[in-house]
Amino acid sequence: MWGTGKPKREFLFVDDLARAVFYLINLKKNKKIFKNFPIINVGSGDEISIKNLAYKIKKVCKYKGKIIFDKKFPDGTPKKSLDSSKINRLGWKSKVKLEQGLKIVHNNYLDLKK
């Protein structure tokens, strides 16, 4: 893998995004909300380092090999996460945790291979 694995990222399961969009559409009836919040980020609020993510994926996939981080390559942006405070104040929260989402995606992949 490129870099040290230290940069942090935030991930959101696609079903949570769909739920957020549906939630916001239903709130649209209250026009004041969208006047005050014209742009709304949707995120999980959970960060993970690329290194820890790689090891979670390794565990979910039952991969037995080594993960090698090549420090000759750049890490990229140290942190990429969203400020989801607006949608959280409106009462929405993500439901699917990262490890659960990884398992769902992995199981779906295995089902496709059948």
Image (cartoon, rainbow, N blue to C red):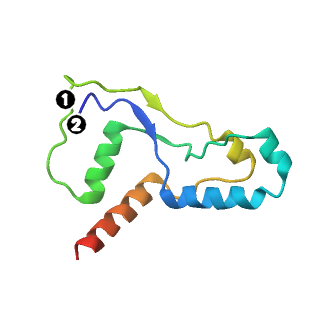
Q: Where does residue 34 sit, x and y in percent of width and height?
A: 78, 45
Quadrant containing the N terminus is top left
Callout 1–callout 2 Cβ contact below 8 Å: yes
Q: Is residue 64 left or right of residue 89?
A: left
Quadrant containing the C terminus is bottom left
Q: Residues within 10 Å of mark 1 (few under 14, many from 20)?
A: few
Which of these two is toward me, 86 or 24? 24
Q: Where does residue 29 sit, x and y in percent of width and height?
A: 82, 58
Element at badge 1? loop
Element at badge 2? loop
Q: Is residue 7 left or right of residue 110?
A: right
Residue 4 visible at all: yes
Residue 95 visible at all: no
Which residue in the structure is indicated by mark 2? 1
Give the image quarter of residue 82: top right
Q: Which of pointers 1 and 2 lies earlier in the amino acid sequence? A: 2
Task: In the rendered view, tell whether residue 29 sits above or below residue 112.
Answer: above
Q: Where does residue 105 sit, x and y in percent of width and height?
A: 36, 62
Which amino acid is tagged 1? Asp
Q: Where does residue 71 sit, x and y in percent of width and height?
A: 21, 24
Q: Report the label total.
A: 2
Which residue in the structure is indicated by mark 1? 70
Which amino acid is tagged 2? Met
Q: Residues within 10 Å of mark 2 (few under 14, many from 20)?
A: some
What's the residue at 33%, 49% (across, down)? Answer: 56
What's the residue at 26%, 28% (across, down)? Answer: 3
What's the residue at 71%, 59% (across, down)? Answer: 25
Give the image quarter of residue 17: bottom right
Q: Is residue 11 left or right of residue 54?
A: right
Task: In the rendered view, tell whether residue 78 sits above or below residue 56.
Answer: above
Q: Is residue 43 left or right of residue 79?
A: right
Which of these two is toward me, 113 or 66? 113
